[in-house]
Image (cartoon, rainbow, N blue to C red):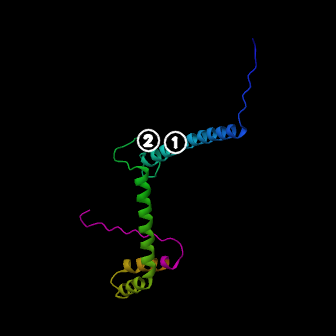
Amino acid sequence: MSGTMSVNVDEKIVNEVVQNEIAAAIGRQLVDYREAVEKMVMETLTEKVDNRGNKDRYDSRSSPTRMQYLAMEAIREAVKEAMNEAVAERKGDIKELVKKQIVSGKSKLAKSLVDGLARSLDTKWYSTINIKLDSPDD
């Protein structure tokens, strides 16, 4: 006895089941993707870096994490900006104090330093001033 059996299933039900399965598969993939991205982000932020922000080849215990390094760099930049703004706001006062010191005629070194400082403050270029005085014992 051979027979053929036929089952009629409503197309709406089939479409709904297929759509639910596709949505579930996409959802699983998104969860896996999100977990992978979260893991990569955490590894990137917690890896040890050197003083340039590059991955530390020696993995020293004292090396900061990338997150610590980036926070320190952001703070350094904010301090630098604040200092530049404060100096720019008081530029005239600084020049007057320096001129006053020069006019007193006590030091040729002071005069040359002030002249150079005054010229550098008048330019739009970034100025760096380093002064080192050694004690007589050195």
- Whether 7 is among the magenta residues is no
Q: In the picture provided, is 23 more to the left or to the right than 108?
A: right
Q: Quadrant of residue 68?
A: bottom left
In the rendered image, residue 32, in percent from the top left (x then y), is placed at 53, 40
Please say whether residue 70 is visible from this viewpoint.
yes
Which residue is pictured at 23% across the width and 64% down the height? Answer: 137
- The residue indicated by pointer 2 is 57
Q: In the picture provided, is 116 more to the left or to the right than 131?
A: right
Which residue is pictured at 33% across the width and 84% down the height? Answer: 106
Under circle 2, the secondary element is loop
Placement of the C terminus among the 4 image quadrants: bottom left
Compared with 114, 35 (above or below) is: above
- The residue indicated by pointer 1 is 36
Separation of marks 2 and 1 at Cα, in angstroms: 24 Å
Instruction: Kindly report which numbered mark, 2 or 1, lies closer to the viewer in this rendering.
Output: 1
Magenta segment range? Answer: 120-138
User: Which amino acid type is shown beneath numbered disc 2?
Assistant: Arg
User: Which amino acid type is shown beneath numbered disc 1?
Assistant: Ala
Under circle 1, the secondary element is helix
- The overriding secondary structure of the stretch rendered in magenta is loop
